[in-house]
Image (cartoon, rainbow, N blue to C red):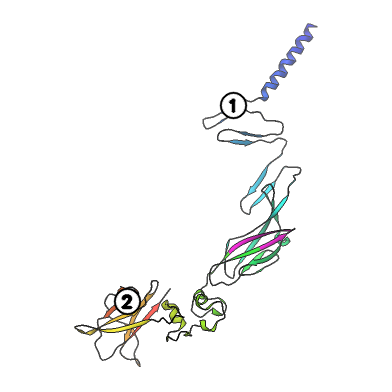
Amino acid sequence: MKPLLQQLTRVSIILLASLVSVHAGPRVSTNYSIATDVADAGGKRTTSASYSNDGSAGGAAALATVAAPAEVARSGYIGQLYDITGLAISGASPNVNEGATDQLAAWQTLDDATLLPVAATSVTWSVQTGPLTSINASGLATAGIVYQNTAATAQGSYLGNTGAFVLTILNVNLDDFGAYAGDQIDDSWQVQYFGQPPNANAGPNVDVSGTGQTNLFKYVAGLNPLDGSRFTLAITSVPGQPGQKNLSFNPVFSGRTYTVTAKSSLITGSYSPINASFPIDNGTTRTMTDLSASGTSKFYRVEISRP
């Protein structure tokens, strides 16, 4: 009996050593320390002051994500229960040039804050608001022509859920809006004073207020075409200088270039820049002196340009 007892005692000692080995001691390095912990049969989260570790057992894995396009994959699970909470819509870009296209995409949103991609051809697309001319069955949205940067909303529906995506259509061409296109006047200026096209009063050669200056001239000069304002040029003598003339014109605005030209006859010859003093501004009035104003006649013209 004594050999058998010794054998049993030896087995008990071996089993005890095996159990103790499951309980790990603290792990320490120069950069961090993880407190003593015990992992159960299925794995669990272990944490320290600066780190956390999600362990797993049996080949199960967690969530894998990618930022663009946004997608979440569940790998290594036999099955998972979730509820669909809505539909998320996005586009290739939040901004699209007028007349260009933007590819839309859709995802089902789940109650665990993850996403399931939906084929664009399975979504029912529509224009909710703004100047989108169409969205085809593949989710390709086409932007309309705008006179200023304008917001638009695309909508998608799938299996009873609806989502929306707001994008901005950029006004990249200043003179291409409807009946106001191609007349050398910024479309936004015409809409500001004459409303949406068509409006015959917004034409470049129209003078609605009867000032003798057309809409095109007033646009370039920075004038209101409706209030009767006009650009003026006054010519006065310089005391004690019979060969000089003071030229004062109004209004002047930043962002424009003003060039005074002259010629001696309205019938022949061409206009050329004058020999002038340095201009002096007083409010919106600019004055310069023509230093070579001798002669029987001289006709002046102010040329205005803007970018």
Quarter occupied by the C terminus: bottom left
Q: Give the image quarter of residue 10.
A: top right
Relative to residue 248, is residue 113 depicted above or below?
A: above
Rate crowding at label 2 as few (under 14), some (14 to 19) or many (20 or more) other CA atoms within 10 Å. some
Image-based side of 184 in relation to 297, left or right? right
Which numbered tag is attached to residue 286? 2
**Region rendered in magenta:** 155-167
Who comes first in sequence, dot 1 or dot 2? 1
Toward the viewer: 227 or 287?
227
Image-based side of 234 in relation to 87, left or right? left
In the current view of this chain or complex, which residue is farthest to the top?
A: 2
x and y percentages locating residue 254 in the rendered image: 38, 71
Q: Amino acid at mark 2?
A: Arg
Work out how far the residue at label 1 is from the one at label 2, CA to CA, in angstroms. Answer: 83 Å
Helix, strand or loop for the magenta stretch, by majority? strand
Quarter occupied by the N terminus: top right
Q: Which element is circle 2 on?
A: strand
Mark 1, residue position? 26
Relative to residue 41, is residue 1 depicted above or below?
A: above
Toward the viewer: 99 or 1?
99
x and y percentages locating residue 50 in the rendered image: 55, 35
Which numbered tag is attached to residue 283? none
Q: Which element is circle 1 on?
A: loop
Image-based side of 67 in relation to 162, left or right? left
Q: Give the image quarter of residue 179.
A: bottom right
Q: Amino acid at mark 1?
A: Pro
Toward the viewer: 87 or 50?
87
x and y percentages locating residue 62 in the rendered image: 68, 42
Q: Is residue 221 magenta?
A: no
Q: Is residue 165 magenta?
A: yes
In the current view of this chain or complex, which residue is farthest to the bottom?
A: 267
In the current view of this chain or complex, which residue is farthest to the left?
A: 240
